[in-house]
Amino acid sequence: MGLSARQQDLLRRIPGVDHLLERARAERGLHGIPRTVLVNSARRVVEALRRSILDNGDRFSENRLSDAALLDAVADRVDREMAFNLKRVVNATGVVIHTNLGRSLLPRTAIDNVAALSGRYSNLEFDLATGRRGSRYSAVEDILCEVSGAEAGMVVNNNAGAVLLALETLARGRKVIVSRGELVEIGGSFRIPDVMARSGGILTEVGATNRTHLRDYEGAVDADTALLLKVHKSNYSVVGFTAEVSLTDLVALGKQHGVRVMEDLGSGMFIDFSKYGLAREPTVQDSVATGADVVTFSGDKLLGGPQAGLIVGKKDVLDAIKKNPITRALRIDKMTLAALESTLRLYRDPEEAVATIPTLRALTMAYEELKQRAGRLSEDLAGLGDDRLTTVLLDLPSRVGGGSLPLQDLPSRCVGVEIAGISANAVESAMRAHEPPVIGRIEDDRFIMDPRTVGEDETPLIRDAFRRLLERA
C-alpha cells in the first residue's frame, strides 16, 4: 500500500539532521554538548518522526513539525543522552535490601572514606612499615577477625565468588557432601550444584528434601571426601516434618573423620536481630565459634556494607585460599575495601552499628516512628491542595529482601495514594519516569509508599513528583 499525499507532504517537511542540529544549538543553548551527542539526538528525532508518519498515516499531528516542537524534541533527547544510566532512585517499596535497587545503603563514614581514597593514591598494596609490596587483604583482615572471632579472613567480589573460590581450593576433584534440602538457588540463577560443578568439586547429596540426619553424612564419608558443606537456606524455608544437622554436629563429625567443614551463610550478619523482635538467625560469630574451617557470607545484605564476599575461618585454610590463582580474578577494588573497612569498624560497638548502618537502622525501626513518618508524608501530599489526590494510611508489612529472612514481616505504616481519573498503574509509571524516579508498589488499586525505606530528606522529592504528575494531568 502506497503513501498518501499527506504522508508524502509531511515527510518532505521533516528538516535535515544538520539543519535541525544547528538551529537546536543556537536556539536551545546546547553549547558545550559533545557533537556526537547532538548529532545522535537530532538523527533519532528525525527517525522517530519518519516512523510515526509512516505508521500513523493521517492521524499524525502536524504540531510535531513546528519549529518549537522540533527543537524541544532535540533538547529533550540531548538531556536523556547526557544523563547517567545508573542513577539515584527513591525506594518507597518497603523492601530494605532491594537487589534491583542496589541492596544496602552505605553508612556515612563509609561514603566519606570512599570519597577520600578514590581520588587520591593509597597504600592499597604497599606495606608502609617495610616500604615493600603488601597485600590488599591486610586492609580489612584484622578488623574482620576482630569482629567475627576467626583466625584469618579475606574478601572477594561477592559471596558467589567466595563459595566458588573456597570449593575450588579445598575440594577440586574430590567429594563434597551436602544435604539435599540445602541445594539452594538464589537470584540470577545462582545454584549450589552449578557452582560446585564449576569448582571441580564432586557433589554428593545426602538425606531428603525435608529431613537430613547426621547418619546420612556419616554414611557418605569416605577416603575421597574433601568437605562437609552446610548451606544456609536464606531465601526459603522448609516447615512441617523437618530435620537438619547443626553446624556444631557437622564440625564434630568432620574432626572424627579428618574432613574439613564449610558453611555458606549467604546473607551473613554480626548482629543478633532477635533482640529487636526479628527472627533468630545464626550470626557469623556463632558459625566461627563452632570450629568450622571456613565460613562465607555477603557484604551487602544484612551486613549493610558494599558488595563483597567475605571468607573467614582457620588460618591454614585461608592461607591456602589466598594462594589460589583464581583470587586475582575475584579481588575487590580500593573503593570497596574502603567502604567495607569503614562498615566493619562500626561493629566494634553493636549499638552504634544498629544506629548508623542504614540497613540495620531500617530493619529495626520502631512502628511508632514509621507511623509518624507516614503521617508527615500524607500531610505533605495533602498540602499540594489538589482535590483529585487522596491519601490513606495503611498497616502493611515491609520486607527484609535480598534473600534474607524470607518469612519475616516487618510491621509498617504505609501511605496509599489514589488520583481521580488516573489508574494506579499510570501513577506508578509516572513516578518511575520522574527525576529522580520514585519506586513504590501497587496494592488494591492504590500506589503504596512505605516510609521504612524512604529517607527523611526524600519526602520533598516525592511531593515534587506528585506535583508534576498533577500538573501534567
Image (tube, rainbow, N blue to C red):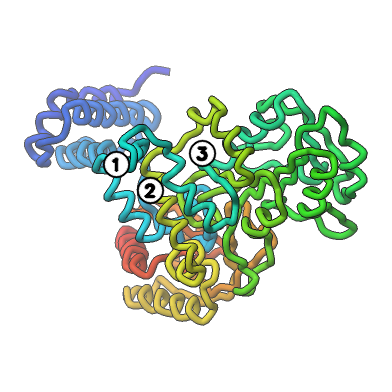
User: What residue is pinned by disc 3?
Assistant: 156
Q: Residue furthest front?
A: 130
Above or below, comparing residue 459 to residue 301 in the picture? below
Q: Which of disc 2 and disc 1 is earlier in sequence?
A: 1
Residue at horizontal 69 percent and vertical 61 percent from the top: 407
For the C terminus, the image quarter is bottom left
Amino acid bearing label 2: Ala
Q: Are marks 1 and 2 in contact (CB under 8 Å)?
A: yes
Residue at horizontal 74 percent and vertical 43 percent from the top: 261
User: What residue is pinned by disc 2?
Assistant: 338
Identify the disc placed on residue 201.
Answer: none
Would residue 450 be seen by someone viewing this image from the given angle?
no
User: What residue is pinned by disc 1?
Assistant: 122
The residue nearer to you, when weighing 260 against 425, is 260
Above or below, comparing residue 378 to residue 48 in the picture? below
Amino acid bearing label 3: Val
Which of the two discs, 1 and 3, sits closer to the camera?
Answer: 1
Residue at horizontal 63 percent and vertical 48 percent from the top: 266
Q: Quadrant of residue 204?
A: top right
Q: Which of disc 3 and disc 2 is earlier in sequence?
A: 3
For residue 68, side relative to residue 274 (left or right): left
Q: Residue furthest top?
A: 2
Q: Residues within 10 Å of mark 1 (few under 14, many from 20)?
A: few
**Helix, strand or loop at disc 2?**
helix
Amino acid bearing label 1: Ser
Residue 260 in the image: x percent, y percent?
A: 74, 39
Residue 17 in the image: x percent, y percent?
A: 19, 24
For residue 426, side relative to residue 23 (left or right): right
